[in-house]
Image (cartoon, rainbow, N blue to C red):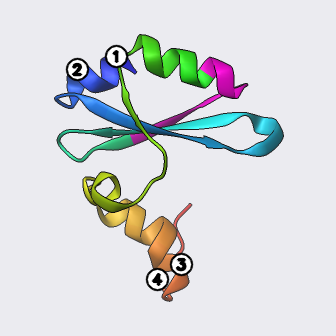
Amino acid sequence: MDAFARAHGGAEGQLAYIGRAGTRIVLVGEDGAWGDLVAPTHDIARGAAERAGLTLHESFDGEFAAKVRTGPYEWTRMAGLQIGGRRSA
């Protein structure tokens, strides 16, 4: 998370419980880049985020979500599939 923040001018995050798989840590850089990691437990995810000095958001919406910049890959993989776009591998 530190490396991501350094590469993207800082970062903020949001933790999302994803069941038995653990907790997803969504990172959004100040430049709009985003990424994610999965930790085996919520406590581990929260601890890692705190050690990295991330500002954590309760939900992925509003101004936080608006910071994300998406490109052709995201549109093809996510929204593109829903609106009849080409499937990518």
Residue at image location 47% in from the left, 22% down from the top: 49
Residue underneath mark 1: 2
Residue 38 part of the magenta segment = yes
User: Please, what is the three-letter code of the amino acid marked with disc 3?
Assistant: Leu
Measure how far apart labels 2 and 1 are at the Cα level: 6 Å
Residue 9 at x, y percent in the picture: 16, 29
* Residue that mark 2 sits on: 6
Instruction: Find out whether the residues at labels 2 and 1 contact each other: C-beta distance under 8 Å.
Output: yes
Which of the numbered marks, if any, corresponds to residue 81?
3
The crowding category of the residue bearing disc 2, from other C-alpha atoms within 10 Å (few below 14, some 14 to 19, many at least 20), is few
Whether residue 86 appears in this view of the structure is no
Position of 80 with respect to 19 (left or right) is left
The CA distance from mark 4 to mark 3 is 5 Å
Residue depicted at x 60% and y 38%: 24
Query: Number of marks in the image?
Result: 4
Q: Which residues are magenta?
A: 35-44
Q: For this rendering, which residue is in front, 87 or 18? A: 18
State the separation of the CA atoms marked 3 and 2: 33 Å
